[in-house]
Image (cartoon, grey):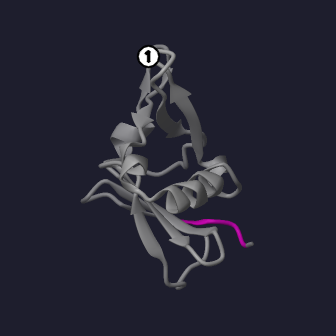
Amino acid sequence: MAKPNFNYDEASDTLYISFEPGENATGIELNDHILLRINKGERRAIGLTLFEYSLLAQKTEIGPRSFPLSGLAQLSDELREIVVAILSSSPVSEILAVSAYTPSLAEVIPITSLQSVPSVAA
């Protein structure tokens, strides 16, 4: 796999990350800020689109911002399993750190934060 291609659109504050440029993909909305593009049949990432990138990349006084992966709840069990495997694997795992927030023993909320912040003029 080639090195990811980063393309930042300053006007819309959107970072496009392509792992396989030009390849058709299925878009999976992980939340309002993150769109994962995948090849569902081959179970691999094609790209990521990060909307409001400057917000996603913004650090807090105690570390990186985390965002819930609310879109996972909308997926079928099979597709959710595929997406979680893709999120946990390279190249996506080199950009997004995935973990869970557990407000109680019964509740698990998947969350993500930027693992690696590409340097763009954000």
Quarter in which the N terminus is drawn: bottom right
Say which residue label 1 marks. 103
Give the residue at the far right of this rendering. Answer: 1
Within 10 Å of disc 1 (Cα), the crowding (few <14, some 14-19, many 20+) is few
The residue under the point 50% across, 56% down is: 77
Indicate whether residue 4 is drawn in magenta. Answer: yes
Q: Nearer the viewer, residue 52 or 88?
A: 88
Magenta residues (range): 2-6
The residue under the point 49% across, 14% down is: 62
Which quadrant holds residue 117?
Answer: top right
Indicate whether residue 51 is drawn in magenta. Answer: no
From this view, report whether residue 115 is shown above or below residue 100. below
Q: Nearer the viewer, residue 46 or 121?
A: 46
Q: x, y percentage for residue 86? A: 62, 58
Q: Secondary structure at mark 1?
A: loop
Q: Is residue 17 visible?
A: no
Q: Is residue 114 visible?
A: yes
Q: Is residue 59 left or right of residue 97?
A: left
From this view, report whether residue 117 is shown above or below residue 92. above
Q: Amino acid at mark 1?
A: Pro
Q: x, y percentage for residue 33? A: 34, 49
Q: x, y percentage for residue 104? A: 46, 15
